[in-house]
Image (cartoon, grey):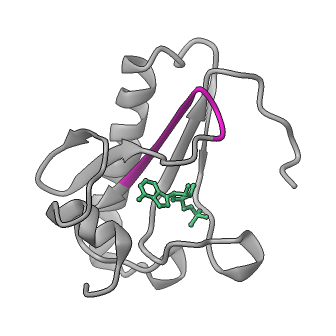
Amino acid sequence: MADCLFCGIASGEIPGDIVYRDESVLAFRDIDPKAPVHLLIIPGKHIAGVDKLEAEDEETIGHAMSVARRLAAEHGVSESGFRIVVNTGPDAAQSVRHIHLHLLGGRALDWPPG
Ligand code: AMP
């Protein structure tokens, strides 16, 4: 989608530190990491947020979760623990309206979040 930052990263028009890609999802390092491991996993298809998910997206989002699990292992945080966050809408401070899973790990994470 035009004017979407993450569509730009997915298409290669905008640089991204991509660590994983397959036919339906990709993952890249967050530009402003909040933890030693901070990856974003996104579908290649533009979906604005969880609030806009459709039934046909279920397989892709389930796959994104599996990719997150695999990346957590590859980045050494499976045993220590990690958090997957999907901010949705204004109250959750979603700043990029292209659905993304934050994969955070490598330090003790506070709970509850702010
Ligand atoms: P959210 O606030 O949940 O929408 O998260 C958006 C995330 O995208 C933030 O953690 C930003 O640091 C991150 N971000 C913004 N621009 C870029 C970029 N060009 N490359 C990688 N991550 C980005």
Quadrant of the snapshot with the N terminus:
bottom left
Any magenta on residue 37?
yes
In percent of width and height, residue 110 lies at 84, 36
Residue range in magenta is: 34-41
Residue 107, relative to residue 96: is it above or below?
above
20 relative to 12, above or below: above
Picture quadrant where residue 45 is located: bottom left
Which residue does the image show at 64% across and 80% down from the upper left?
89
- Residue 90, compared with residue 99, is above or below; it is below
Horizontal side of residue 73 vs 110, given as left or right:
left
> Seen from this angle, which residue lies furthest left?
23
Name the image quarter holding the C terminus: bottom right
Q: Which of 88 and 66 is in front in this view?
A: 88
Q: In this view, does 10 lie above or below 70?
A: below
In the image, 63 versus 85, the foreground residue is 85
Q: How would you classify the magenta stretch by its main secondary structure?
A: strand
Question: Residue at point 63% right, 22% down?
Answer: 81
| Percent position of residue 8, x then y | 25, 69
Q: Where is residue 21 in the image (x, y as percent from the top left)?
A: 19, 44
The structure residue drawn at horizontal position 43% and vertical position 80%, both measured from the top left corner, is: 48
Count of marks placed on residues: 0
Q: Decide whether residue 114 is among the magenta residues.
A: no
- In the foreground, 75 or 2: 2
Q: Residue at x 30, y 77 (%)?
A: 46
- The image quadrant of residue 92 is bottom right
Does residue 87 appear to the left or right of 65 in the view shown?
A: right
